[in-house]
Image (cartoon, rainbow, N blue to C red):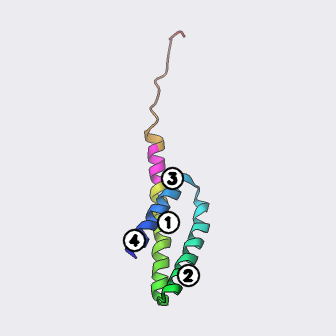
Amino acid sequence: MVMLTIASLIIGALLGQRFKVFVLVPTIALATVAIAGASLAHGNSAWSTALAAVLVVTGLQMGYLGGMTARLITAHGSVPRAAPMHGSAR
């Protein structure tokens, strides 16, 4: 489950850097269906499936928040401020 959580954090961070928050709804739905299908195929218990779903959904949201924060920091930090040009002729 650790690998699943790390993967969901990375996917969430990638989504946070490129898309608006509404992309999380279909992503969470798709991830939940995929986890339920994989757990059913492996014969896992309901508690194990629920725990995996909660970890992935939380990882996606936390990763999205981190990716969005990184985008915000890089957007404001990478643009240098130009000094005003007073009295210079072009």
Please name which of the two marks, 1 or 4, marks the residue nearer to the observer.
Answer: 4
Q: In the image, what residue occupies the spot 49% across and 65% down?
A: 61
Which amino acid type is shown beneath numbered disc 2? Gly
The relative height of residue 14 versus residue 72 in the rendered view (above or below) is: below
**In the rendered structure, does residue 8 fall within the stretch colored magenta?**
no
Please name which of the two marks, 3 or 1, marks the residue nearer to the observer.
Answer: 3
Residue underneath mark 4: 3
Which of marks 1 and 2 precedes in the sequence? 2
Picture coordinates of residue 57 (x, y %)?
50, 72
Which amino acid type is shown beneath numbered disc 3? Gln
Q: Which region shows up in magenta?
A: 69-74
Residue underneath mark 1: 61
Magenta span: predominant SS is: helix
Q: Quadrant of the C terminus?
A: top right
Disc 2 secondary structure class: helix
Which of marks 2 and 3 precedes in the sequence? 3
Picture coordinates of residue 75 (x, y %)?
48, 43
Residue underneath mark 3: 17
Which of marks 4 and 1 precedes in the sequence? 4
Residue underneath mark 2: 37
Which amino acid type is shown beneath numbered disc 4? Met
Q: Quadrant of the N terminus?
A: bottom left
For label 4, count other residues whose C-alpha is less than 10 Å away and answer few (under 14), some (14-19) or many (20+): few
**Marking on residue 74:** none
